[in-house]
Image: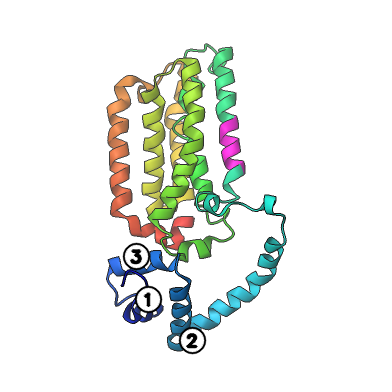
Amino acid sequence: MSAEHASTRIIEGYARGGTDLAADEVWAVEAHLETCRVCRDRLSAAVAAGVPAVASLVDTVWSGLEPRLAVTATMPRGRRRPARLSRWLTPAMVPWLATVVGVTLLALLLDLAGTGTGTGEVSVVLLLAPVLPVLGVAASWSRGLDPAYELTASAPRAGLHLVLRRTASVLAVVVPALLVGGWVTGVMVAQWLLPCLAFTAATLALGGLVGVTRAAVALAAVWAAVVVAPTLATRRTAFALQTGGLPVWALILALGIGVVIARRGAYSVLGAHR
Protein backbone atom coordinates (compact mmCIF):
# COMPACT_ATOMS: atom_id res chain seq x y z
CA MET A 1 0.00 0.00 0.00
CA SER A 2 1.40 3.39 -0.97
CA ALA A 3 1.67 6.35 1.37
CA GLU A 4 -1.45 7.92 -0.18
CA HIS A 5 -3.77 5.16 -1.42
CA ALA A 6 -4.17 1.41 -1.29
CA SER A 7 -3.06 -0.56 -4.33
CA THR A 8 -5.55 -2.19 -6.66
CA ARG A 9 -4.41 -5.63 -5.50
CA ILE A 10 -5.16 -4.83 -1.86
CA ILE A 11 -8.50 -3.17 -2.63
CA GLU A 12 -9.68 -6.09 -4.74
CA GLY A 13 -8.37 -8.63 -2.22
CA TYR A 14 -10.14 -6.86 0.62
CA ALA A 15 -13.36 -6.74 -1.39
CA ARG A 16 -13.18 -10.54 -1.71
CA GLY A 17 -12.92 -10.91 2.06
CA GLY A 18 -9.22 -10.38 2.62
CA THR A 19 -8.44 -14.10 2.74
CA ASP A 20 -5.56 -13.74 0.29
CA LEU A 21 -4.03 -10.76 2.13
CA ALA A 22 -1.55 -10.80 4.97
CA ALA A 23 -2.85 -9.82 8.41
CA ASP A 24 -0.81 -6.62 8.48
CA GLU A 25 -2.15 -5.67 5.05
CA VAL A 26 -5.75 -6.12 6.24
CA TRP A 27 -5.06 -3.98 9.31
CA ALA A 28 -3.35 -1.29 7.24
CA VAL A 29 -6.10 -1.06 4.63
CA GLU A 30 -8.86 -0.94 7.27
CA ALA A 31 -7.10 1.88 9.08
CA HIS A 32 -6.58 3.68 5.76
CA LEU A 33 -10.20 3.28 4.70
CA GLU A 34 -11.36 5.10 7.84
CA THR A 35 -9.78 8.33 6.59
CA CYS A 36 -9.64 8.01 2.78
CA ARG A 37 -12.85 8.61 0.85
CA VAL A 38 -11.15 7.89 -2.48
CA CYS A 39 -10.20 4.36 -1.45
CA ARG A 40 -13.65 3.78 0.07
CA ASP A 41 -15.17 4.67 -3.30
CA ARG A 42 -12.71 2.33 -5.01
CA LEU A 43 -13.66 -0.43 -2.58
CA SER A 44 -17.36 0.14 -3.26
CA ALA A 45 -16.74 -0.17 -6.99
CA ALA A 46 -14.67 -3.33 -6.47
CA VAL A 47 -17.39 -4.90 -4.33
CA ALA A 48 -20.09 -4.02 -6.85
CA ALA A 49 -18.06 -5.54 -9.69
CA GLY A 50 -16.61 -8.59 -7.95
CA VAL A 51 -19.06 -9.48 -5.18
CA PRO A 52 -22.55 -8.38 -6.29
CA ALA A 53 -24.26 -10.32 -3.46
CA VAL A 54 -22.44 -8.24 -0.87
CA ALA A 55 -23.24 -5.04 -2.77
CA SER A 56 -26.94 -5.99 -2.75
CA LEU A 57 -26.81 -6.65 1.00
CA VAL A 58 -25.17 -3.27 1.64
CA ASP A 59 -27.85 -1.52 -0.42
CA THR A 60 -30.56 -3.27 1.61
CA VAL A 61 -28.96 -2.22 4.90
CA TRP A 62 -28.60 1.38 3.75
CA SER A 63 -32.21 1.53 2.61
CA GLY A 64 -33.23 0.63 6.15
CA LEU A 65 -30.83 3.10 7.76
CA GLU A 66 -31.59 6.13 5.58
CA PRO A 67 -34.79 7.16 7.43
CA ARG A 68 -32.98 7.07 10.78
CA LEU A 69 -29.98 8.93 9.41
CA ALA A 70 -32.28 11.61 8.02
CA VAL A 71 -33.74 12.11 11.50
CA THR A 72 -30.27 12.33 13.03
CA ALA A 73 -29.21 14.90 10.43
CA THR A 74 -32.09 17.19 11.41
CA MET A 75 -31.36 17.04 15.15
CA PRO A 76 -30.10 20.23 16.79
CA ARG A 77 -26.33 20.36 16.87
CA GLY A 78 -26.27 20.41 20.66
CA ARG A 79 -28.05 17.03 20.83
CA ARG A 80 -25.58 15.19 18.63
CA ARG A 81 -22.85 13.19 20.26
CA PRO A 82 -19.35 14.25 19.30
CA ALA A 83 -17.73 11.86 16.83
CA ARG A 84 -14.73 11.29 19.07
CA LEU A 85 -16.96 10.46 22.05
CA SER A 86 -18.91 7.87 20.05
CA ARG A 87 -15.69 5.94 19.50
CA TRP A 88 -15.40 5.37 23.23
CA LEU A 89 -19.00 5.19 24.45
CA THR A 90 -22.37 3.83 23.37
CA PRO A 91 -25.74 5.21 24.53
CA ALA A 92 -26.38 1.98 26.45
CA MET A 93 -23.30 2.57 28.60
CA VAL A 94 -24.44 5.89 30.05
CA PRO A 95 -27.17 4.66 32.45
CA TRP A 96 -24.99 1.74 33.51
CA LEU A 97 -22.07 4.02 34.30
CA ALA A 98 -24.40 6.32 36.23
CA THR A 99 -25.64 3.28 38.18
CA VAL A 100 -22.07 2.22 38.98
CA VAL A 101 -21.22 5.68 40.28
CA GLY A 102 -24.44 5.75 42.30
CA VAL A 103 -23.68 2.36 43.87
CA THR A 104 -20.17 3.56 44.73
CA LEU A 105 -21.55 6.64 46.46
CA LEU A 106 -24.09 4.49 48.35
CA ALA A 107 -21.31 2.15 49.50
CA LEU A 108 -19.31 5.17 50.65
CA LEU A 109 -22.26 6.47 52.65
CA LEU A 110 -22.71 3.05 54.29
CA ASP A 111 -19.02 3.00 55.22
CA LEU A 112 -19.21 6.49 56.70
CA ALA A 113 -22.33 5.53 58.64
CA GLY A 114 -20.65 2.36 59.91
CA THR A 115 -23.61 0.22 58.85
CA GLY A 116 -22.07 -1.67 55.97
CA THR A 117 -21.88 -5.00 57.76
CA GLY A 118 -23.49 -4.21 61.08
CA THR A 119 -20.15 -3.40 62.78
CA GLY A 120 -18.48 -1.15 60.24
CA GLU A 121 -15.37 -3.41 60.31
CA VAL A 122 -15.52 -4.29 56.60
CA SER A 123 -15.55 -1.58 53.94
CA VAL A 124 -18.49 -1.85 51.53
CA VAL A 125 -16.44 0.04 48.94
CA LEU A 126 -13.78 -2.65 49.23
CA LEU A 127 -16.40 -5.39 48.87
CA LEU A 128 -17.88 -3.92 45.69
CA ALA A 129 -14.72 -2.56 44.02
CA PRO A 130 -13.90 -5.72 42.00
CA VAL A 131 -17.36 -6.08 40.44
CA LEU A 132 -18.33 -2.45 39.84
CA PRO A 133 -16.38 -2.01 36.56
CA VAL A 134 -17.68 -5.37 35.34
CA LEU A 135 -21.20 -3.92 35.04
CA GLY A 136 -20.03 -1.15 32.73
CA VAL A 137 -17.83 -3.47 30.66
CA ALA A 138 -20.73 -5.87 30.17
CA ALA A 139 -22.98 -3.02 29.06
CA SER A 140 -20.36 -1.64 26.67
CA TRP A 141 -19.99 -4.93 24.81
CA SER A 142 -23.41 -6.52 25.18
CA ARG A 143 -25.27 -7.87 22.19
CA GLY A 144 -28.60 -7.25 23.88
CA LEU A 145 -27.88 -3.64 24.84
CA ASP A 146 -26.21 -2.50 21.61
CA PRO A 147 -28.74 -2.32 18.74
CA ALA A 148 -25.85 -1.90 16.27
CA TYR A 149 -23.86 -4.87 17.50
CA GLU A 150 -23.68 -6.52 14.07
CA LEU A 151 -22.34 -3.36 12.45
CA THR A 152 -19.97 -2.87 15.38
CA ALA A 153 -18.53 -6.37 15.14
CA SER A 154 -17.97 -6.07 11.38
CA ALA A 155 -16.52 -2.55 11.37
CA PRO A 156 -12.81 -1.96 10.63
CA ARG A 157 -10.64 -2.59 13.68
CA ALA A 158 -13.72 -3.49 15.71
CA GLY A 159 -12.13 -6.29 17.71
CA LEU A 160 -9.73 -5.93 20.60
CA HIS A 161 -9.00 -2.32 19.62
CA LEU A 162 -12.61 -1.29 20.24
CA VAL A 163 -13.28 -3.41 23.31
CA LEU A 164 -10.20 -1.96 25.00
CA ARG A 165 -11.39 1.56 24.20
CA ARG A 166 -14.77 0.91 25.76
CA THR A 167 -13.20 -0.81 28.76
CA ALA A 168 -10.91 2.17 29.25
CA SER A 169 -13.91 4.52 29.17
CA VAL A 170 -15.58 2.45 31.90
CA LEU A 171 -12.46 2.46 34.07
CA ALA A 172 -12.07 6.20 33.52
CA VAL A 173 -15.40 6.66 35.32
CA VAL A 174 -15.20 3.88 37.91
CA VAL A 175 -11.61 4.28 39.10
CA PRO A 176 -11.92 7.97 40.12
CA ALA A 177 -15.14 7.20 41.99
CA LEU A 178 -13.45 4.32 43.83
CA LEU A 179 -10.39 6.49 44.45
CA VAL A 180 -12.55 9.02 46.27
CA GLY A 181 -14.32 6.26 48.20
CA GLY A 182 -11.06 4.60 49.19
CA TRP A 183 -9.49 7.88 50.24
CA VAL A 184 -12.46 8.87 52.41
CA THR A 185 -12.70 5.47 54.10
CA GLY A 186 -8.94 5.01 54.47
CA VAL A 187 -8.68 1.89 52.31
CA MET A 188 -5.26 1.43 50.70
CA VAL A 189 -5.35 2.04 46.94
CA ALA A 190 -3.83 -1.32 46.03
CA GLN A 191 -6.52 -3.16 48.03
CA TRP A 192 -9.29 -2.05 45.69
CA LEU A 193 -7.38 -1.16 42.50
CA LEU A 194 -5.74 -4.54 41.91
CA PRO A 195 -8.98 -6.54 42.39
CA CYS A 196 -10.80 -3.99 40.22
CA LEU A 197 -8.34 -4.35 37.33
CA ALA A 198 -7.98 -8.11 37.81
CA PHE A 199 -11.75 -8.68 37.65
CA THR A 200 -11.99 -6.53 34.54
CA ALA A 201 -9.19 -8.43 32.81
CA ALA A 202 -10.72 -11.77 33.85
CA THR A 203 -14.10 -10.68 32.45
CA LEU A 204 -12.57 -9.85 29.08
CA ALA A 205 -10.51 -13.04 29.06
CA LEU A 206 -13.49 -15.27 29.85
CA GLY A 207 -15.65 -13.14 27.54
CA GLY A 208 -13.61 -14.27 24.56
CA LEU A 209 -14.92 -17.79 25.23
CA VAL A 210 -18.50 -17.39 26.47
CA GLY A 211 -19.33 -13.74 25.74
CA VAL A 212 -18.53 -10.68 27.83
CA THR A 213 -21.99 -10.34 29.36
CA ARG A 214 -22.13 -13.97 30.44
CA ALA A 215 -18.60 -13.75 31.82
CA ALA A 216 -19.50 -10.63 33.82
CA VAL A 217 -22.61 -12.23 35.31
CA ALA A 218 -20.75 -15.44 36.17
CA LEU A 219 -17.80 -13.70 37.86
CA ALA A 220 -20.09 -11.33 39.77
CA ALA A 221 -22.13 -14.29 41.01
CA VAL A 222 -18.98 -16.15 42.09
CA TRP A 223 -17.69 -13.07 43.93
CA ALA A 224 -21.01 -12.61 45.72
CA ALA A 225 -21.16 -16.25 46.80
CA VAL A 226 -17.51 -16.80 47.71
CA VAL A 227 -16.52 -13.44 49.19
CA VAL A 228 -19.41 -11.03 49.82
CA ALA A 229 -21.83 -13.44 51.50
CA PRO A 230 -19.26 -15.00 53.90
CA THR A 231 -17.87 -11.56 54.73
CA LEU A 232 -21.30 -10.21 55.63
CA ALA A 233 -22.10 -13.37 57.61
CA THR A 234 -18.90 -13.48 59.65
CA ARG A 235 -18.28 -9.71 59.75
CA ARG A 236 -14.62 -10.41 59.04
CA THR A 237 -12.57 -9.26 56.07
CA ALA A 238 -11.93 -12.18 53.71
CA PHE A 239 -8.38 -13.04 52.68
CA ALA A 240 -9.13 -11.85 49.14
CA LEU A 241 -9.68 -8.33 50.50
CA GLN A 242 -6.60 -8.25 52.72
CA THR A 243 -3.13 -7.04 51.75
CA GLY A 244 -1.87 -10.63 51.81
CA GLY A 245 -4.05 -11.42 48.80
CA LEU A 246 -2.58 -8.68 46.59
CA PRO A 247 0.02 -10.97 44.91
CA VAL A 248 -2.82 -13.30 43.90
CA TRP A 249 -4.74 -10.41 42.35
CA ALA A 250 -1.58 -9.30 40.51
CA LEU A 251 -1.21 -12.83 39.12
CA ILE A 252 -4.86 -12.92 38.00
CA LEU A 253 -4.41 -9.55 36.33
CA ALA A 254 -1.31 -10.72 34.45
CA LEU A 255 -2.99 -13.98 33.37
CA GLY A 256 -6.12 -12.12 32.24
CA ILE A 257 -4.13 -9.69 30.13
CA GLY A 258 -2.18 -12.58 28.63
CA VAL A 259 -5.34 -14.46 27.67
CA VAL A 260 -6.91 -11.34 26.15
CA ILE A 261 -3.83 -10.74 24.00
CA ALA A 262 -3.54 -14.40 22.99
CA ARG A 263 -7.22 -14.56 21.99
CA ARG A 264 -7.53 -11.06 20.56
CA GLY A 265 -9.24 -12.37 17.45
CA ALA A 266 -12.20 -13.62 19.50
CA TYR A 267 -13.54 -10.08 19.97
CA SER A 268 -14.12 -9.63 16.23
CA VAL A 269 -16.97 -12.16 16.15
CA LEU A 270 -20.58 -11.77 17.22
CA GLY A 271 -20.20 -14.42 19.93
CA ALA A 272 -18.31 -11.94 22.11
CA HIS A 273 -21.51 -9.88 22.39
CA ARG A 274 -23.42 -12.54 24.27
**As drawn, is 139 to the left or to the right of 253?**
right
**As drawn, is 92 to the left or to the right of 131?**
right
* Residue on which disc 3 sits: 27
Spatial CA distance of label 1 from label 3 is 10 Å
Q: Can you give x and y, in whole percent of width and height, for residue 172 in the image?
A: 48, 37
Residue found 32% across the figure and 76% down from its top: 19
Spatial CA distance of label 3 from label 2 is 24 Å
* Magenta span: chief secondary structure: helix
Magenta stretch holds residue 161:
no
| Quadrant of res 66 | bottom right
From what the image shows, is residue 43 above or below residue 123?
Answer: below
Q: For the residue marked with disc 3, what is the amino acid?
A: Trp
Q: Nearer the viewer, residue 51 or 96?
A: 51
**As drawn, is 12 to the left or to the right of 177?**
left
Q: Which mark is residue 207?
A: none
Highlighted magenta segment, given as a residue range = 95-102
Q: For the residue marked with disc 2, what is the amino acid?
A: Pro
Residue found 36% across the figure and 30% down from its top: 194
From what the image shows, is residue 61 above or below residue 108?
Answer: below
| Quadrant of res 264 | bottom left
* Residue on which disc 2 sits: 52
* Residue on which disc 1 sits: 14
Q: Can you give x and y, in whole percent of width and height, for residue 198 in the image?
A: 36, 36
Q: For the residue marked with disc 1, what is the amino acid?
A: Tyr
Q: Nearer the viewer, residue 10 or 207?
A: 10
Mark yes or no: residue 202 visible. Answer: yes
- Reading the chain from its start, which is encountered first: label 3 or label 2? 3
Q: Quadrant of the N terminus?
A: bottom left
Give neighbour class at mark 2: few <14, some 14-19, many 20+ (Cα, 10 Å): few
